Amino acid sequence: MARFGACPRYAGDLTPLEDRLDSWKEIAAYLGRGIRTVQRWEREEGLPVHRLAHEKRGSIYARREELAAWWESRRLTLTQPAADDTPAPPTPRLERVTMTSAMTTWPALSSDARLVAYVSDGGQDGTTPQIWVQQIGGASLRLTSGDVAYSHLSFSPDNTGVVFTGTSESGSNVYEVPALGGEPRLLQRDARNGTISADGRWLASVPPDGGGIRIADRRGGGFRRIASELVDVACAIWTPDSHGVLVHARPGPLLEPDWWVVPIDGNAPINTGIVRQFRQAGLTTIPTGAAWLGHSLIVSAARAPHGVSLYRQRVIPSSFQPTGEPEQLSAGSESAFLPSAARDRVAFLSNRADANLWSVGVDPGTGIARGPLRRLTRGPHPLGYLTATSDFRTLAYFSFRLGRAEIFLRDLQTGSERALAEVPAGENGYPAISPDGSVLAYGVRLPGGERAQRPIFLAGLRDGTVRTLGDDCGGRPREWIDERRLIIERFARLNSIARIDTDTGDQHDVLVSAERSIRNPRLSPDRWWIAFDASRPGEPSAVFVASFADDSVPESAWNLVERSASLPFWSADGRWLYFTPTGTNPLVRSAIRGRSFDTAAGLGDSRSIAVCTLNEIVIPAYLAGTAPLATPDQIILVLGDFRGDIWLLDLGVS
């Protein structure tokens, strides 16, 4: 039989198949643009795309010669730098990646969007969370086995390694572990938040003091610090072109934080203004993580009372300034945290985060908890800042239960409670009730410009009056010393503790450090001692106690109670000083320990005792104001089930 040359294959419209593109993906690849862009061109610019009426809805094709002619006719218009390449609204598709409902954090998506790494306890409560890697739709592989806190995961540019921060009592270091298993390798000592640029040349990390960022050449030669004027740097994310690093930081100790782009060539940092943009839209950004996706930044943000969702903010590539309004990407009752993005996909942590009040009985003689946990409130909304009268009759706290920050008063004998109605409607929080229950101090945060205003108000619970203690007290109330003086927690680069006279408004330092931030002050019942936790930037907190006096207490007079611990509080009689060990998951606390205390001599036995162990529900230490409170017969705690899973949001169109 004679052989003939190959004949061209034809589609139903007699177009050779080799000259036809049969999907949006093929059309986009042919034109060198994204799928949503070419769809918009077809809709608005007359891009010649044909539909097959006899097949399923959405079947399309295009002829190469027609696309080429259209491209030539529109070439000059399409190459203008105007914002004509703005993607059309996405039609996202959700996919659940992990199925363990474990204590899961720090998801990282590989550059090809095929692998996801994360930190998880694997559903085994009480165990140290480890680093896992999983192919999308496949099985998981554990990469680590150490007894340290793992955080801030990212993939190397070639996806062969997972970069992470390992934190212990000795500090934080940046490591890389092979993505298919092997021994971790040290990349940068005394650093955190490490990440490698897309071109593979640079390693960015945050120094221990949180001032600026370190840039290390991976070919050798040590590192250099840039943008040292930025403080409280919370994360480091490379821009897609590897020319800069996105950080969340303050431009000065007393100024408000925002997202900044730091050029690695030494030029001045660029304030994106994204935090300000979100505040104007009624949103509060979550500074723990962000991700680039094209010319957009993906962040988590909260809008009361709807919880935390993912949002996309488009930015102008040349200036990194926001353009347009924040666009919500996720919805539902669960919160979405820690986005990581690649190829139109966003991996994130989803959990319910249902903080509520619970209580457990306590033996006054031994100081140890006894009996089961008892639930006091219901709902998924954040709450905190527990404060009680000296007779332990009334508990005050704040919650978003009614759709905005409201203060609640609870009768601890009857269990009845009500929202505080004596104050003007608005976002009211951070309560501190006076010892006799006659006055409640509360604070608000008023954003404005580079520095937020933090006024404190005093509400008379018996006469219904409200007066302003100061238009900007620099902090928020924490606890009353007596019926006139109030302890406040002041905000700057390093938090400090002060007392304020509620008659005159005069402030005086109580606890100040040149190196440590001081938080969560709690006075002993007799007001002779003050317990608190303090930490240097980037290091685990430790609990201290000091004699309380009218003058500022120097650091030399601080007594260490426990390393790697926080959230101290006292027993009702002052005989026990309780605290929560940090453990290997810095976001939560799963135990309460205590040390005996002599109100005259101070700390007693050097050993601490186990007071309460928590399993499925834990203390959300990442939320401010979650220190427990003890009455004569119970410990009241903020607890929640914060187990969650990794989900994948596909913003592309197939």
Image (cartoon, helix red, strand yellow):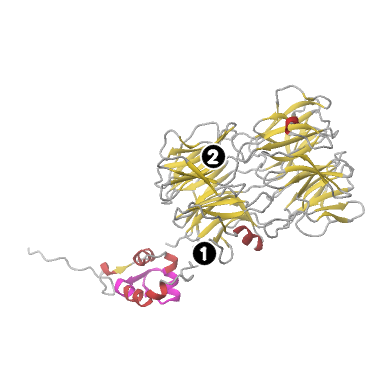
Image quarter where the N terminus lies is bottom left
In the image, is residue 12 part of the stretch drawn in magenta?
Answer: no
* Residue 283 or residue 419, whichever sits in front: 283
Mark 1 crowd level (few <14, some 14–19, many ≥20, 10 Å Cα): some
Q: Is residue 309 above or below residue 634?
A: below
Q: Which residues are magenta?
A: 38-67
What type is the residue that disc 2 sits on? Ala
* Residue 105 or residue 86, whichever sits in front: 86
Q: Position of residue 516 (x, y in %)?
A: 67, 38
**The label number, if any, that marks residue 191 in the structure image:** 2
* Residue 600 or residue 576, whichever sits in front: 600
Residue under label 1: 316
Q: Is residue 346 left or right of residue 534?
A: left
Q: Position of residue 532 (x, y in %)?
A: 74, 36
Q: Quadrant of residue 478?
A: top right
| Badge 1 element | loop
Q: Quadrant of residue 515?
A: top right
| Whether residue 324 can be seen here | yes
Q: Is residue 219 above or below residue 168?
A: below
